[in-house]
Image (cartoon, rainbow, N blue to C red):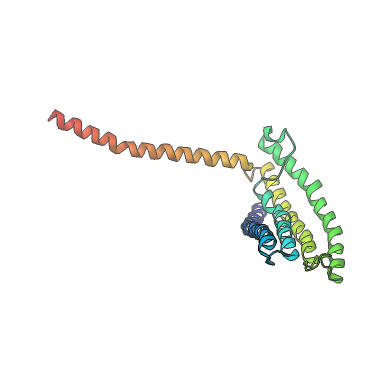
């Protein structure tokens, strides 16, 4: 189990790096979107040619990168959407059991099914060098390649989640949700703030004690 937990930590680190990459892509997408907005106004009122179909398609290509490649990172930090209203009220081991069963019997098989469908679809698109039907548009096969890549990453992160859930059930891993980790971090910050306040108050008390001693003399 320790070796498997080490593998899970390595996968989580990879997903964290992926999250940093997705953050950069998000900023790039926003920049392209702003350029497209101002470009359309400039084209309309100034007669320029800033806007183009390729830039419009690039914007939603970048959104596809965020959506498809960001799934593994979102799962690694436990920020994916849950619809189970009872999950948060359960004990950690019961939540771990739900995650283990859900990952093994639903998430991982679903990823395999998507890969089974998406890989031939991408190969067909790549084989014919499928492009945009709009003039000046981009190739279509790169964005279709994102689908199998994204679900490979999600499958790998699912393995990490299954390992951590199994570790929690066997007592080798302390299973906590992201909300619990954030609450713990908030408690630590409050404790530090209280300690800082105490340390700030110590010189004041010492100074007051010295003044009292001087009055007595």
What quarter of the picture does the C terminus occupy?
A: top left
The percent coordinates of residue 56 (x first, y second) are 73, 61
Q: Quadrant of residue 8?
A: bottom right
The percent coordinates of residue 108 (x first, y second) are 79, 51
Q: In the picture provided, is 155 more to the left or to the right than 11?
A: right
- Foreground: 72 or 25? 25
Residue farthest to the left, as pictured: 217
Q: In the picture provided, is 103 more to the left or to the right than 183?
A: right
Q: Is residue 104 depicted above or below 147 in this figure?
A: above
Residue farthest to the top, as pictured: 216
Q: Residue at x 31, y 37 (%)?
A: 202
Q: Is residue 125 depicted above or below 207 in this figure?
A: below
Q: Residue at x 75, y 55 (%)?
A: 155
Q: Residue at x 63, y 45 (%)?
A: 173
* Residue 134 in sight from this viewpoint: yes
The percent coordinates of residue 135 (x first, y second) are 80, 67
Q: Residue at x 79, y 68 (%)?
A: 139
Q: Please tell me how many numbered marks the rendered image carries.
A: 0
The percent coordinates of residue 166 (x first, y second) are 70, 46
- Foreground: 134 or 190? 134
* Residue 18 in sight from this viewpoint: no
Q: Quadrant of residue 93?
A: top right
- Foreground: 82 or 4? 82
């Amino acid at each position: 189990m320790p070796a498997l937990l080490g593998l899970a930590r390595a996968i989580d680190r990879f997903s964290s790096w992926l999250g940093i990459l997705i953050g950069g892509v998000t900023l790039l997408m926003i920049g392209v979107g702003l350029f497209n907005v101002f470009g359309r106004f400039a084209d309309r009122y100034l007669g320029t040619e800033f806007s183009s179909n390729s830039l419009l398609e690039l914007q939603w290509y970048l959104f596809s990168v965020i959506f498809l490649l960001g799934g593994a990172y979102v799962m690694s930090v436990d920020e994916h959407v849950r619809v189970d209203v009872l999950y948060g009220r359960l004990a950690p081991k019961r939540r771990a059991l739900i995650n283990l069963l859900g990952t093994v019997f639903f998430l991982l098989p679903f990823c395999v099914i998507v890969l089974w469908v998406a890989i031939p679809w991408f190969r067909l698109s790549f084989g014919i060098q499928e492009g945009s039907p709009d003039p000046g548009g981009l190739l279509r096969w790169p964005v279709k390649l994102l689908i199998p890549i994204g679900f490979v990453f999600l499958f790998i992160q699912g393995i990490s989640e299954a390992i951590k859930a199994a570790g929690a059930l066997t007592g080798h891993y302390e299973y906590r949700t992201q909300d619990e980790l954030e609450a713990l971090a908030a408690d630590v910050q409050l404790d530090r703030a209280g300690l800082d306040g105490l340390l700030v108050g110590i010189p004041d008390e010492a100074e007051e004690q010295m003044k009292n001693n001087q009055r007595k003399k």
